[in-house]
Amino acid sequence: MRYISTRGQAPILNFSHTLLTGLAEDGGLYIPETWPHLSHNDLRELRKLDYSELAAKIIGLFTGDDIPAPILLDLCKQSYANFNHKAIVPLVQLEHNLFVQELFHGPTLAFKDMAMQLLGRLFDYVLSQREEHITIVGATSGDTGSAAIEAFKDSKYLTVTILHPYGRTSEVQRRQMTTVLSPNINNIAIKGSFDDCQDLVKSMFADMPFRKEMHLSAINSINWGRIAAQIPYYIYAALCLGAPDREISFTVPTGNFGNILAAWTAKKIGLPIRFLGVASNHNDILTRFLLNNDMSIQEVKPSLSPSMDIQISSNFERLLFELLDRDAAQCCQIMQNFRKDGKMNIPEQSWTKATQNFKGMSLNNEETKKAITKIFKDSLYLADPHTAIGIITAQKYLEKDVPMVTVATAHPAKFPDAIKQATGILPPLPLAMADLYERKENYQILPADLQAIENSVRTVAYQNNF
């Protein structure tokens, strides 16, 4: 399996190099050079596997010969052994043909654990084989950072710096990051938005001397390893509900377009998906694109669903590359103009292709609270703000003959204030996190200044014998 950049000017890499590289040197994102394919018989064979076994089979399509199959299976089993539900990704029925797939039973109570727990082990395996040390930098709008920190803490092969927007995550999200005191972990609160954090990460990768000095790598969903590790749960849910002998639809709360890109990839390689619902909050650039071909940047406004407080959806570039029939030069030009002008000019034909696969909907804060209330009243299901938006979007597009699954991206206890406002219930943290509010925090507050961030990254790396 080989990987190419969406902008066509970076080296072609195998899976291990792609994993360690993250963002391509030309500023693009890596994507498989050719897509694997699963026949209906292949999919039926997967029905007999448990989640870890299925994940190893699917991810193995993308690792190629880089990770021996027995080792990959062992890494998958280790990754999901500490989840607090035997099914790993259980399905809950809300109404006829409407289901929720809970992806929050990992150690940090968010769907990011599904990929990050495996990525931590993949990084350690590859780096141990090479006897190398790297520096990971990442931006988070809430959940990626805590999942990465939990997965990579205490590793002897890498240091991790996570940027989060100061005051724009929930307190639980922040504390899950900042109370991990391992010496290889560096938390920085940026005075700005998530997009500012993401821009700083991309700027560090664009600074080639710094990138090479620090051996930078990424764990945001710009890293293809993250996408590959998220594909299995879509296939698992579909098989549980009758695929490949019936179609299925999914609705995904999304901001950076990584989680729903994994669902699209599942369709691309053979899963019979009718359509994919894009659920947004009032930072609705993806919904505006699907409704009106309006991919224009607006001000990021804080919301009850902070993981979607994004206006620059990095993973959309991978879809754009496919919508343009893999024209890397055109993709590069459109992305460069987007960053310069704040508007993405997508050809009408490509937009039409997107609308054949995706449908969009957005809710503002007041609508989100009403959604949480309604879902609890109708189905006795306590949905976090992101998942609630996903469920309402699913209800809008629900078809009687096709099962619809909304992926539940976070445990309601991560957003206690919003849940209490909507239902009067204060969801408790699981026992393992019961003392979270009492733990000591350690993080810096810095301006969105590249030099200041690079100095901090460098300091922590060398303190850990880089």
Image (tube, grey):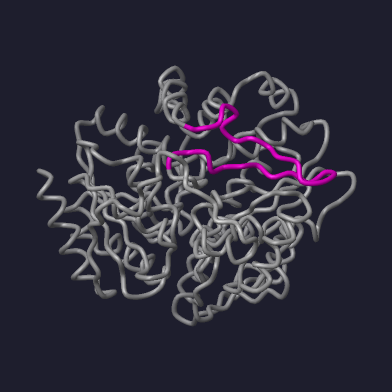
Q: How many marks?
A: 0
Quadrant of residue 54 within the rendered picture = top right
**346 and 235: which is toward the camera:** 235
Q: Is residue 95 magenta?
A: yes
- Please report the bounds of the magenta region as a residue range: 83-107
Quadrant of residue 265 within the rendered picture = top right
**78 and 264: which is toward the camera:** 78
Locate residue 322, reporting x and y percent. 61, 55
Locate residue 198, reporting x and y percent. 39, 65
Chief SS of the magenta region = loop
Q: What residue lies at 36% left-to-right and 75% top-to-bottom? A: 192
Q: Is residue 297 magenta?
A: no
Locate residue 439, reporting x and y percent. 28, 51
Q: What residue lies at 81% left-to-right and 58% top-to-bottom? A: 397
For the C terminus, give its image quadrant.
top left
Q: Tell me if 324 is positioned left or right of 415 in this view.
A: right
**341 and 378: which is toward the camera:** 378
Q: What residue lies at 22% left-to-right and 37% top-to-bottom? A: 157
Q: What residue lies at 27% left-to-right and 41% top-to-bottom? A: 153
Q: Tell me if 20 is positioned left or right of 60 in this view.
A: left
Examine the rendering and report whether any part of residue 465 can be seen: yes
Examine the rendering and report whether any part of residue 3 can be seen: no
Locate residue 75, reporting x and y percent. 41, 26
Q: Residue furthest front?
A: 424
Residue 118's place in the image compared with 214, above or below, is: above
Q: Tell me if 427 is positioned left or right of 236 in this view.
A: left
Q: Tell me if 436 is positioned left or right of 456 in this view.
A: right
Residue 48's place in the image compared with 327, above or below, is: above
